[in-house]
Amino acid sequence: MAGGLSEPALLELLPPPGRLTLDLACGTGELARELRDLGHDVLAVESSRELVRAARHADKRMEVLRAEIVELHHPGKLDAPSGTAARTAEMMEGDVPIHSVRLPGLVADQEVILGDVAQTLSIRHVTTDRTSFMPGVLLAIRGVEALPEPFTIGLEHLLWRS
């Protein structure tokens, strides 16, 4: 199959047909169309306006959501956008707009909003106190010696070690 579905490792990761399958950074929608043809209920997400148009042009039935990120922090946060929002956008592999808010009463929140005609899907992380950062800080302190690179960005290198 053209989108890589012939790879056994990918086939093992897929939920059974009939369940919702999320195709992030779907590009022109080739893989999403293959999954749909196999019976999957596919939610395709792409941040590039050009690729969304290409996916919809290739298949008029294709629903592709666009994405934007809103990050909200306390007024003492100096960088805008935050490193977390920039990393999220990078991992989404596209031109994802980031909106930064700095206001009193906030700690550190981030929301990824996916949207299409008459619908949105939001994934939101809200912190109400800095103590929420402590498990990640402790994980980093305990695992830093095991990291292969002297400078590493992202807790995923400690959470999901190969």
Image (cartoon, rainbow, N blue to C red):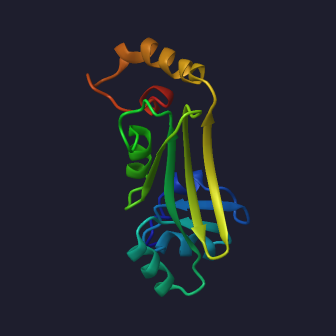
Q: Is residue 107 above or below residue 123?
A: above
Residue at 56% across, 48% down: 111
Location of residue 42 (image quadrant): bottom right
Asked whether, in this view, residue 11 is left or right of residue 94, the answer is: right
* Residue at x 44%, y 44% (from the top left corner): 85
Image quadrant where one finds the C terminus: top left
Is residue 32 or residue 92 the one in the foreground? 92
Q: Determine whether 107 is above or below 131 in the image.
A: below
Q: Position of residue 132 (x, y in %)?
A: 59, 24
Q: Nearer the viewer, residue 38 or 147?
A: 147
Q: Is residue 99 above or below residue 104?
A: below
Q: Residue furthest left?
A: 150
* Residue that extends furthest to the front in the rendered view of this protein: 104
The percent coordinates of residue 29 (x first, y second) are 48, 73
* Quadrant in the picture for residue 80: top left
Q: Is residue 118 above or below residue 7?
A: below
